[in-house]
Image (cartoon, rainbow, N blue to C red):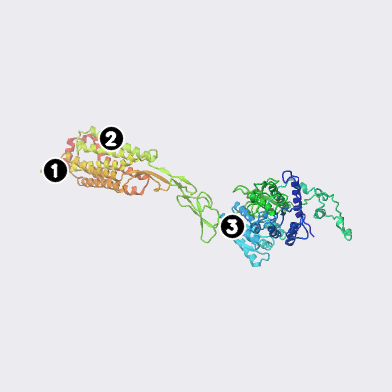
């Protein structure tokens, strides 16, 4: 018979817990807990006989009868995944609570089938949740899963796959492996691992089916994989040392949580045989640890074979090596919690006071005489802090909190190989903080100095979005840039976010930036330049007007209607100044005045020029003998012409302002990166009618002046007006395409430029030659000189 020292510590954990509880005056006072041990030897048959013996209280196994009437059975603690289902089915009949410290079979979570079953370790399906969170932590969105064909592998792998997919992660492959894998199956899995970009594989299988697969991977030099799996599988004796060093070094495994049991270590190393004379296992434990034999247990025939007799005075602390496996303390901690769970349920039962009890009519049960189902009721509702300070309770299905430790296997050549704790998964922590990982303590496998990347596609940077191709997993995608006006401000965005209406996407499409408020202002260089040109031109025009007023009695000024010259100069001053209305923050009044003032003032200017041209024609014809044109000589016809032509434009503008006037507008759609503050024309048709009428006046002026340009008169301005109209028409013809092809403040700048340049053309072509004669050649500004020139021109 083989004795397992590491397993015997579970028995000692129960003994220690019961001893501490019986000495506790606050927990079950005046009540002494007892215990009965039964070794199932991991056999379902022995587990069955053991539970019947404990229920009946007699070795004769008398079902449905309790032989020991003065000693009640509260509940059963035990044990492994092998025997627990069998024991649970029996205890369900009698409704005795069972607390398993080593069973993780997920089927036992079915409360309808096992209503009195509880455990201190989470079921194996929750291990998949913890491993999935570990994968999520490192961003490994492209993983493979290998699962055994047993319930443990199938259910665990499917649970892990579901958790990963719920979080947007992908499983590259899920392959089932068997103890007797065919060569073709092994080669298929090896080829999958080699050809995919998977760098992380989750193993949900015991170690036996993995032996051949790992050897083949080693032969194909596949060593850049991080393996995740259940406890201890990577250090199984079936793996060669080469496989462990090259492939399994750095493996991350999931272990039951190891908590603190105050005083237990001192208790273990100070026990003596004399303290446990009723324990049938203690002498076997002592013999196994010290390699001695108890003489009273040896037959006469075997007495000669005894080399070292056991005295019972040996010291565990003097051995110089650990007696117990430290990692087995994880299950010892689970056993310790199981004893305290049952005790706290009994304590709650003992504190019940009628008529506030949980049973019929508020009744309570007696601690010395209660039904098993009554204690099961209290088991479901326990919640306390154990001796290590951790919260202990059950969920609705009898499951404890999901708490696991992550261990990292360090296979070292110069030192002893060992597991290193690298983190914990604790469902009791606040949401989002369940997983704690010490990344600096992790030793990754060969070829990695830091956490590897296991992704199907590289991460999309901010400013890009993922484009998943039909038929491919969601983790396999292309990265395409966001469209204009949209952004993605995080990595791996599934879609781009439209920017708010007053913002625009940055060049890298990672953030929305405020749109530039664009208007033609006096503060910017363009506005300053146009303002200077406008004011300077108006000052020059005023100066010319002053010259004409000063020399108003000279022949050159009086020629071609002096009053029309004054009117034309004043209108040109206003033309230069009206361009200032287009600059600055547009308001309601500004918008009304911009186009209408420009149109009316230019109509006056063109009407004055037309009147001056008509004056030339009338004056020439009036000098002919017998001409009827003499009666038209005078200011009445010219004044009437100016008033009529200007009135038509005024009427157009009044209709425009009455029906659909211009208004201030904030245009967010005209330019993608700008908000253009401008005046909306209101009626585009009215705007072009106004421009068309100016074009008509200019064309008539040009035609009349062109026909009169060679009349023999020294005072004839027709040739200058012809050229000025040619400049005017050229400017405004080029204005229309330029105006339509620009936007925002540059559209206004084009219009202002057209106003200034056409006004300057009129001023320079008509008045600069006269100013030159008046100021620089006064001898030519005499009646005699001009008459002589006129006679000479007539003879020619």
Q: Secondary structure at mark 1?
A: helix
Image spot of residue 113 (x, y percent): 65, 59
Image spot of residue 699 (x, y percent): 24, 47
Dot 3 or dot 1: first in sequence order is: 3
Asked whether the beta carbons under mark 3 and mark 1 sit within 8 Å of each other, the answer is: no
The label number, if any, that marks residue 367 in the structure image? none
Dot 2 or dot 1: first in sequence order is: 2
Asked whether the beta carbons under mark 3 and mark 2 sit within 8 Å of each other, the answer is: no
Residue receiving disc 3: 162
* In-front residue for pair 780/520: 520
The CA distance from mark 3 to mark 1 is 105 Å
Image spot of residue 196 (x, y percent): 59, 60
Residue 68 can be seen, yes or no: yes
How many residues crowd around disc 3 within 10 Å: few (fewer than 14), some, or many (20 or more)?
Answer: some
Residue 526 position (above or below residue 443):
above
> Which residue is located at x 17 percent, y 35 percent?
783
Image spot of residue 601 (x, y percent): 27, 40
Q: Residue furthest top?
A: 550
Q: Secondary structure at mark 3?
A: helix
Residue 221 can be seen, yes or no: no
> Which residue is located at x 78 percent, y 50 percent?
321
* In-front residue for pair 134/195: 134
Dot 3 or dot 2: first in sequence order is: 3
How many residues crowd around disc 2 within 10 Å: few (fewer than 14), some, or many (20 or more)?
Answer: some
The CA distance from mark 2 to mark 1 is 34 Å
Residue 521 position (above or below residue 73):
above
Q: Secondary structure at mark 2?
A: helix
The CA distance from mark 3 to mark 2 is 87 Å
Residue receiving disc 1: 629
Residue receiving disc 2: 542
Q: Residue furthest left?
A: 626
């Amino acid at each position: 018979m083989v004795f397992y020292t590491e397993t015997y510590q579970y028995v000692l954990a129960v003994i220690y817990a019961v001893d501490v509880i019986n000495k506790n005056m606050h927990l079950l006072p005046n009540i002494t807990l007892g215990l009965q041990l039964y070794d199932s030897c991991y056999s379902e048959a022995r587990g069955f006989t053991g539970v019947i013996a404990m229920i009946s209280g007699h070795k004769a196994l008398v079902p449905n009868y309790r032989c020991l009437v003065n000693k009640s059975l509260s509940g059963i603690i035990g044990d492994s995944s092998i025997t627990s289902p069998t024991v649970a089915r029996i205890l369900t009949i009698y409704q005795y609570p069972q607390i398993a410290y080593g069973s993780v079979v997920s089927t036992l979570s079915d409360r309808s089938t096992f209503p009195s079953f509880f455990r201190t370790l989470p079921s194996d399906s929750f291990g998949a949740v913890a491993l999935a969170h570990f994968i999520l932590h490192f961003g490994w969105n492209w993983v493979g899963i290998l699962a055994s064909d047993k319930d443990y592998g199938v259910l665990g792998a499917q649970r892990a796959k579901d958790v990963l997919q719920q979080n947007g992660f992908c499983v590259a492959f899920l392959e089932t492996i068997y103890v007797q894998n065919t060569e073709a199956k092994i080669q298929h899995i090896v080829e999958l691992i080699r050809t995919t970009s998977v760098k992380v594989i989750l193993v949900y299988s015991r170690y036996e089916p993995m032996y051949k697969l790992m050897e083949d991977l080693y032969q194909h030099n596949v060593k850049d994989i991080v393996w995740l799996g259940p406890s201890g599988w990577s250090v199984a004796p079936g793996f060669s040392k080469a496989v462990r060093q090259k492939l399994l070094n750095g493996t991350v495994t999931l272990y039951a949580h190891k908590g603190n049991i105050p005083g237990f270590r001192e208790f273990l190393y100070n026990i003596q045989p004399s303290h446990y004379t009723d324990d049938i296992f203690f002498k076997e434990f002592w013999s196994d640890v010290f390699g001695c034999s108890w003489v009273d247990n040896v037959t006469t025939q075997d007495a000669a074979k005894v080399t070292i007799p056991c005295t019972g005075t040996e010291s565990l602390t003097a051995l110089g090596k650990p007696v117990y496996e430290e990692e087995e303390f994880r299950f010892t901690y689970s056993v310790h919690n199981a004893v305290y769970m049952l005790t706290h349920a009994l304590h709650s039962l003992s504190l019940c006071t009628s008529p506030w009890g949980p049973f019929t009519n508020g009744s309570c049960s007696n601690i010395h005489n209660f039904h098993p189902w009554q204690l099961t009721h209290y088991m479901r509702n326990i919640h306390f802090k154990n001796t290590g300070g951790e919260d202990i309770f059950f969920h609705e299905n009898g499951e404890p909190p999901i708490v696991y430790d992550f261990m990292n296997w360090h296979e070292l050549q110069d030192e002893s190989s060992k597991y290193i704790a690298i983190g914990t998964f604790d469902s009791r922590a606040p949401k989002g903080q369940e997983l704690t990982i010490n990344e600096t303590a992790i030793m990754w496998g060969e070829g990695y100095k830091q956490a590897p990347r296991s992704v199907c596609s590289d991460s999309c940077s901010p400013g890009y979005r993922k484009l998943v191709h039909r038929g491919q997993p969601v983790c396999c995608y292309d990265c395409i840039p966001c469209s204009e006006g949209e952004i993605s401000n995080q990595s791996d965005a599934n879609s781009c976010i439209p920017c708010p209406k007053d913002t625009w996407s940055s060049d890298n499409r990672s953030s929305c930036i405020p749109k530039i408020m664009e208007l033609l202002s006096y503060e910017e260089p363009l506005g300053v330049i146009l303002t200077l040109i406008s004011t300077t031109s108006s000052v020059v025009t005023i100066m010319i007007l002053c010259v004409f007023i000063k020399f108003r009695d000279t022949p050159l000024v009086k020629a071609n209607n002096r009053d029309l010259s004054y009117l034309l100069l004043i209108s040109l001053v206003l033309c230069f100044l009206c361009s200032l209305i287009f600059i600055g923050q547009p308001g309601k009044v500004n918008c009304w005045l911009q186009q209408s003032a420009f149109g009316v003032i230019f109509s006056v200017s063109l009407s004055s020029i037309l009147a001056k041209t008509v004056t030339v024609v009338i004056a020439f014809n009036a000098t002919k003998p017998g001409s009827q044109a003499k009666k038209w000589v005078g200011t009445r016809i010219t004044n009437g012409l100016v008033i009529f032509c200007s009135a038509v434009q005024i009427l157009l503008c009044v209709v425009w302002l009455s029906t659909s006037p211009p208004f201030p507008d904030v245009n967010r759609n005209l330019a993608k990166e700008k908000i253009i503050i401008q005046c909306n024309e209101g009626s585009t048709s009215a705007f072009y009618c106004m421009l068309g009428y100016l074009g008509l006046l200019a064309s008539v002026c040009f035609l009349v002046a062109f026909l009169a340009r060679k009349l023999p008169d020294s005072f004839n301005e027709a040739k200058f007006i012809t050229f000025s109209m040619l400049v005017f028409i050229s400017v405004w013809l080029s204005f229309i395409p330029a105006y339509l092809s620009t936007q925002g403040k540059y559209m206004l700048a084009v219009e202002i430029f057209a106003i200034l340049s056409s006004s300057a053309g009129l001023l320079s072509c008509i008045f600069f030659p006269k100013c030159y004669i008046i100021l620089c050649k006064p001898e030519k500004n005499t009646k005699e000189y001009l008459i002589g020139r006129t006679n000479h021109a007539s003879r020619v």
